[in-house]
Image (spheres, rainbow, N blue to C red):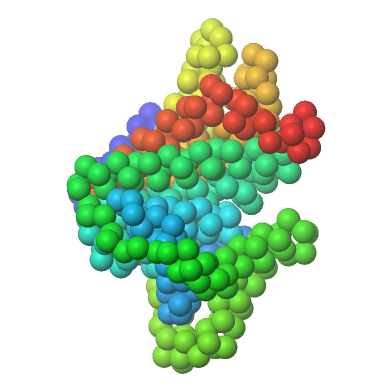
Amino acid sequence: MVGLMIFGTLLVAMLLGFPVCFAILMACFAYLLSAHVPLTIVPQTMVAGMNSFVLLAIPLFTMTGYLMEQTSLSQRLVDFVESLFARSRGSMGVVTIVTCAIFAALTGSGPATVAAIGAIMMPALTKAGYPRETSAGMIAAGGALGPIIPPSANMVVYGATMGLSVSKMFIGGVGPGILMTVCLCLVNVGIAAKRSFAKSDARFPAKVVLRRTLRAIPTLLLPVIILGGIYGGLVTPTEAAVLSVIYATAYGLITRELRIKALFTAMRKTVLTSAVVTFIIAAAKVFGWILSKTRLPAILGAAIMAVIPNKWVYLAVLMLILFIVGCLMDTIPSILILAPILVPVGIDFGLDPLHLGVLFCITLTVGFITPPFGINLFTAVSTTGVPYGQVVKGVIPFMIIMLVCALICAFIPQIITFLPGLMLGA
């Protein structure tokens, strides 16, 4: 009954046209009032949800994206990748997805990646002839690579909760991250071919490619500096975000491309984007707290797992549960609630704990772009200005291929376990 009340209120509010963040809060209030829980828990949980050192990376990396937009850093990257893929249809989509993968390796955050890349690539995609809904959906899907490609906060939480090596999980996420990046690019190429996007007539001799490569070095150095600092143990991801802002600002000032007006424009856009994203996260924290208190996900998971006959059915059911839960609540509460309940069942079936851990995280991440509550969808709306319904329509083909990739990783565990076994031992 509690579950019906919570989700029923949520769906009714959505159907009445309330913004999703307010619909979530209305569902929370409905439960709190019926359970006679003091309503002061709402502001307390929202503030606590925003009071996070890790969340500081969102405005910082978002500002890096807007600073790149105000300088030639992003354009140099676009020119570099264009020189490599100019003769193919959908080259600008490839640029977008590859750039999302690079930013994912910098931020580890889906919303931050969407905000940063959306600001940079949305105008370029529109200019290249992409429909706005496809562009926004592609950016939202590319942002979902954030929690998959290391470093990933979700993997840190899972490793700490389940006693699994975080280093091995990081390395295990590389294979799925590359697989999803390639598959997203293939879907983009398929869309470009179906819509008969014109191929570029541009020719890029070897000298031009070399020159564009050299011009892109300042941009390509950014992930090297950030990832080198993180993996070298010199900085945390949030401190790395500070470095990225300093780097982009210094580049703009040295090249005299970043004027005072442009700097304030980047700061203003950062505040607006970050405020929307942070409010959504705060509302999701209250919803996650209620789900944790009522133990609805755990009850559902335990009931389903009681009738599992073998490991193959287990994997299918596990992914179904995680896919649904991933679009309903934040990944970290999902990990903390469900992993101790669901994962031991798989281990009893003889499955590799590392395989299950990485699979757990990447499947939840697909929920970032799953309607109706995927957080990347809302971030794409606020960043690109495309209505929610159109973003959902545009993201569907990318969401399907990411789910297929997760299924492949589920039933071919070597995609996850090969690199950790090779680099760190079995």
Q: Residue at x 42, y 30 (%)?
A: 404
Q: Count the labels in the image.
A: 0
User: Quadrant of residue 169 in the image?
Assistant: top right
User: Quadrant of residue 272 in the image?
Assistant: bottom left
Nearest the viewer among 382 and 144 is 144
Nearest the viewer among 272 and 255 is 255
Residue 320: x percent and y percent? 44, 26
Residue 265 in view, yes or no? yes
Q: Residue at x 57, y 65 (%)?
A: 220
Q: Residue at x 60, y 25 (%)?
A: 413
Residue 298 position (above or below residue 309): below
Q: Residue at x 61, y 41 (%)?
A: 173
Residue 286: x percent and y percent? 48, 50
Q: Quadrant of the C terminus?
A: top right
Q: Is residue 38 left or right of residue 162?
A: left
Q: Quadrant of the N terminus?
A: top left
Q: Is residue 392 left or right of residue 170?
A: left
Nearest the viewer among 345 and 121 is 121
Q: Is residue 33 left or right of residue 131?
A: right
Residue 248: x percent and y percent? 55, 77
Residue 24 in view, yes or no? no
Q: Is residue 238 left or right of residue 405?
A: right
Residue placed furthest toward the top: 309
Residue 183: x percent and y percent? 43, 39
Residue 246 position (above or below residue 27): below
Residue 258 position (above or below residue 34): below
